[in-house]
Image: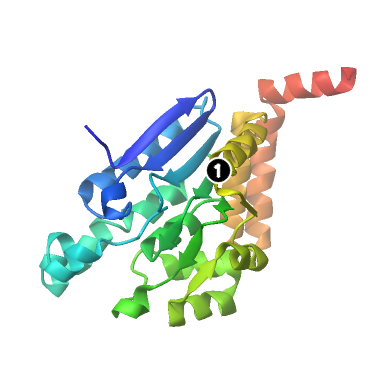
Amino acid sequence: MDTPLDIATSGPVQVWTINSPDVGNAITGTEFVKAFEAAVDAANADLEVRAIVLTGAGKIFSAGGNVKEMADRTGMFGVDERAQRRAYVDGIQRIPRAFSRLEVPIIAAVNGASVGAGCDLAMMCDIRIASERASFAESFVQVGLIPGDGGTWFLPRAVGYARAAEMTFTGDKVDAATALEWGMVSRVVAHDELITAARELADRITKNPSEALRMAKRLLQESRTSPLESVLGMAASMQPLAHLSPEHSSRISRWRTS
């Protein structure tokens, strides 16, 4: 049976593929949310996992919310406003919360259009690599909605406030070349080379010790919102743990003899 999120593991790298191409890899439904939460929790628990690549099946990274369900008033869109508020809190908003606790570096391999919540999903990742066919659109206002999944938190941190405001207020599409210019993505590659490029980057990441990677990621995340003194305090507390790790001792010994 097809699952909303296909997970393939190769050594220390996992590839997560959003696996609903028949609905444009829409981010919708309880099963989709549960699949992401389960994947995050499993990766956190497995210290052998050191990097993750996230992509979409077929031609689209993710079309965001299921517009057909919105139009038909089905699923979470078929309830009154009070129940719908809870549906957001207890539904799609569980995804950014899950990403916020993900300890492992995650790379978005954006293979096509990433629209609305799909754009926000890419912004939740640590690094983004785009196919030349990729595009990004914070398109909520074009259908009379707002980013309900944390997009107004993630997007400004990826491209800065002014460009995030331009994308949010117009809903206009940004192509891969512009995304690169804006710093939204790290690089743009030929479409057929996307997964290879993402895997190569993941492989470079996984050459480093697992615990150091996880602590470094936590510090980067805390640095988004915490004062300098708080981050310095966390670093001072984490670093002794890193110094005492067997991986550190092994790496230092090899470095001294090289």
- The answer to whether residue 11 is above or below residue 42 is above
Q: Quadrant of residue 132?
A: bottom right
24 sits left or right of 78 in the view = right
Q: Indicate the secondary structure of the residue bearing disc 1.
A: helix
How far across and down, in percent of the image, does residue 14 sit? 48, 32
- The answer to whether residue 9 is above or below residue 34 is above
How far across and down, in percent of the image, does residue 126 sit? 56, 50
Looking at the image, which is closer to me, 190 or 71? 190
Q: Give the residue at x 38% y 46%.
A: 58
137 sits left or right of 144 in the view = right
Q: Give the residue at x 12% y 67%.
A: 72
How far across and down, in percent of the image, does residue 214 sit? 57, 38
Looking at the image, which is closer to me, 81 or 115? 115
Looking at the image, which is closer to me, 206 or 227? 206
- The answer to whether residue 160 is above or below residue 6 is below
- The answer to whether residue 113 is above or below residue 44 is below
For the residue marked with disc 1, what is the amino acid? Asp
What quarter of the picture does the N terminus occupy?
top left
Q: Quadrant of residue 77?
A: bottom left
Q: Quadrant of residue 231?
A: bottom right
User: How many dots with numbers?
Assistant: 1
Task: Give the colouring mode of the picture.
Answer: rainbow
Q: Give the residue at x 57% y 76%.
A: 163
How many neighbours does mark 1 have within 10 angstroms: few (below 14), some (14-19), or many (20 or more)? few
How far across and down, in percent of the image, does residue 218 sit? 57, 46
Please indicate, yes or no, whether residue 158 appears anywhere in the rendered image: yes
What quarter of the picture does the C terminus occupy?
top right
Please indicate, yes or no, whether residue 120 appears anywhere in the rendered image: no
The residue under label 1 is 192
